[in-house]
């Protein structure tokens, strides 16, 4: 176990903001994790889990407590009944797991190529992109339950997966130790659902192109949007999408559509996708752009990515307060223009919108 005092969290987040952690502990075994978490809980000390730091916005005052990094790695691949099980330690970099699955001819996570961060964080917000999310393949989540002080194995039905959400998000009850995925042994990707990806691959939606080509097409699309962490791309100094796409009841969507026509003229059509349970999902990026916040917006240290409307970028030397001020401005602008509340995707620590 490694313990360091007063570590700047800006060094551990992709947004490069966050004041110091009182103590940063790196735990290399499950026993160490249990010792650190159990110890902090018994002492009533605040605890924050940090992994790749790619979905965290931490305030400038830092975190007055224990910040825990899990160094639990390892990937195991084995046959199981009618499919293949891939089990990865929480700290295993997610894109490495995807690359390995694609190389081994295992289908089910190829559209999630290029997403930064750790495997242990993927269940937290049910990581998703280009028509896939991890809830489709997660078979089991091994975790430490801070409420009972015991290790648990959670079935997907216990994980409460939804769009960019789960029972883990917004709750600090579980520390994810390991995630198990059920994949299909096939050289072909799962049927492509996302129109932009189908076009990039030159296939029809529903077709099954080769796994490797699918991964490459996803990586290329992501790079063109600054959505792959790249030291040479200043637009990738972000937490990915800063706002989730709003999910609205049908009546609220009708008022939004009316408001959009009043504001933008006859023939305006707000993007809409049917969601489960009769509600609909619309596009946060569309609303932000039509409210006047274009790519490259902002002339300060915090701005909107020049490649993607949803990404708030630290252009160099921004504070968490700068990023929050911009996010508030965008949220207020969308509320004033369309009456829709935007919700942040990253976990906010010590800051509020
Ligand atoms: C350029 C870029 C592109 C992105 N694109 C996407 C995308 O396409 N789709 C998408 O869904 N996300 C995307 N993201 C967001 C982010 O990459 C994912 O949410 C990722 O899963 C976060 O992993 P992490 O290891 O960095 O987690 P962190 O940022 O370290 O942590 C995120 C949250 O999870 C908690 N957490 C982390 N590990 C554990 C654990 N083992 N147990 C319990 N809690 C834990 C943390 O406490 C925190 O609340 C993107 C981010 C960036 C910077």
Image (tube, grey):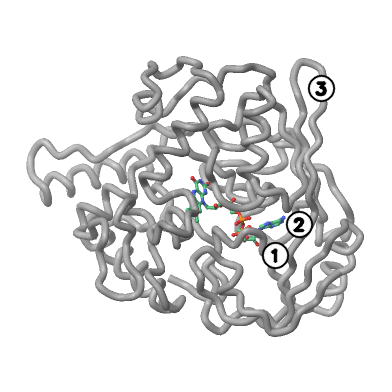
Residue 169 placed where, x, y %?
A: 61, 55
Q: From the Cβ of disc 1, is ligand 1 less than 8 Å away?
A: yes
Horizontal side of 249 relative to 62 (left or right) equals left
Residue 244 placed where, x, y %?
A: 43, 51
**Which one is in front in this view, the residue at disc 2 or the one at disc 3?**
3
Work out whether 183 lies above or below 231: above
Q: From the Cβ of disc 2, is ligand 1 less than 8 Å away?
A: yes
Q: Residue beneath label 2, please?
A: 175
Residue 273 placed where, x, y %?
A: 36, 33
Asked which secondary structure carries label 1, the reply is strand
Q: Residue beneath label 1, please?
A: 49
Determine the residue positioned at 31% across, 46% down: 252
Mark count: 3
Asked which secondary structure carries label 2, the reply is strand
Q: Considering only order in the chain, which callout, 2 or 1, is on the residue closer to the N terminus?
A: 1
Asked which secondary structure carries label 3, the reply is strand
Determine the residue positioned at 54% across, 59% down: 55
Q: Considering only order in the chain, which callout, 3 or 2, is on the residue closer to the N terminus?
A: 3
Contact, CB < 8 Å: mark 3 with mark 1? no
Image quarter where the C terminus lies is bottom left
Residue located farthest toward the front when viewing the structure as drawn: 232
Q: Considering only order in the chain, which callout, 1 or 3, is on the residue closer to the N terminus?
A: 1
In which quadrant of the rendered view does residue 299 lie?
A: bottom left
Q: Assess disc 2: are there few (<14), some (14-19) or many (≥20) residues with their C-alpha within 10 Å of its C-alpha.
A: many
Horizontal side of 213 relative to 257 (left or right) equals right
**Between marks 1 and 2, how big is the CA–CA gap?**
8 Å
Determine the residue positioned at 36% across, 67% down: 327
Q: Residue beneath label 3, please?
A: 79
Contact, CB < 8 Å: mark 1 with mark 2? yes
Horizontal side of 317 relative to 37 (left or right) equals left
Which of 307 and 206 lies nearest the eye of the viewer?
307
């Amino acid at each position: 176990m490694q313990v360091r005092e007063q570590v700047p969290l800006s060094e551990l987040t992709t947004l490069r903001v966050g004041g110091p952690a009182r103590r940063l502990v790196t735990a290399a075994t499950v026993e160490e994790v249990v010792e650190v978490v159990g110890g902090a809980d018994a002492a009533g000390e605040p605890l924050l889990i940090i992994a790749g730091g790619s979905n965290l916005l931490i305030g400038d005052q830092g975190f007055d407590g224990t910040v825990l990094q899990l160094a639990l790695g390892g990937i195991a691949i084995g046959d199981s009944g009618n499919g293949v099980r891939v089990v990865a330690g929480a700290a295993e970099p997610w894109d490495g797991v995807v690359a390995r699955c694609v190389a081994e001819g295992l289908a089910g996570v190829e559209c999630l190529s290029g997403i930064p961060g750790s495997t242990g964080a993927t269940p937290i917000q049910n990581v998703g992109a280009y028509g896939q999310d991890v809830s489709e393949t997660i078979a089991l989540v091994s975790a430490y339950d801070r409420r009972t002080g015991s290790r648990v194995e959670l079935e997907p039905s216990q994980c409460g997966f939804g769009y960019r959400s789960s029972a883990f998000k917004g709750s600090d009850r579980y520390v994810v130790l390991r995630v198990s995925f059920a994949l299909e042994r096939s050289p072909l990707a799962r049927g492509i659902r996302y129109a932009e990806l189908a076009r990039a691959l030159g296939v029809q939606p529903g077709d099954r192109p080769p796994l490797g080509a699918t991964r490459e097409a996803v990586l290329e699309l992501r790079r063109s949007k600054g959505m792959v962490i790249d030291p040479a791309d200043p637009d990738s100094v972000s937490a990915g999408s800063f706002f989730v796409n709003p999910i609205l009841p049908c009546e609220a969507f009708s008022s939004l559509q009316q408001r959009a026509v009043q504001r933008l003229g006859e023939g305006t059509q707000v993007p809409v996708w049917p969601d489960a349970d009769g509600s609909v999902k619309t596009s946060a990026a569309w609303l932000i752009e039509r409210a006047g916040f274009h790519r490259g917006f902002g002339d300060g240290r915090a701005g909107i990515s020049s490649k993607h409307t949803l990404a708030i970028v630290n252009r160099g030397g921004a504070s968490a307060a700068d990023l929050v001020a911009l996010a508030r401005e965008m949220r207020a602008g969308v509320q004033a223009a369309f009456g829709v509340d935007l919700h942040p995707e990253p976990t906010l620590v010590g800051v509020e919108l």
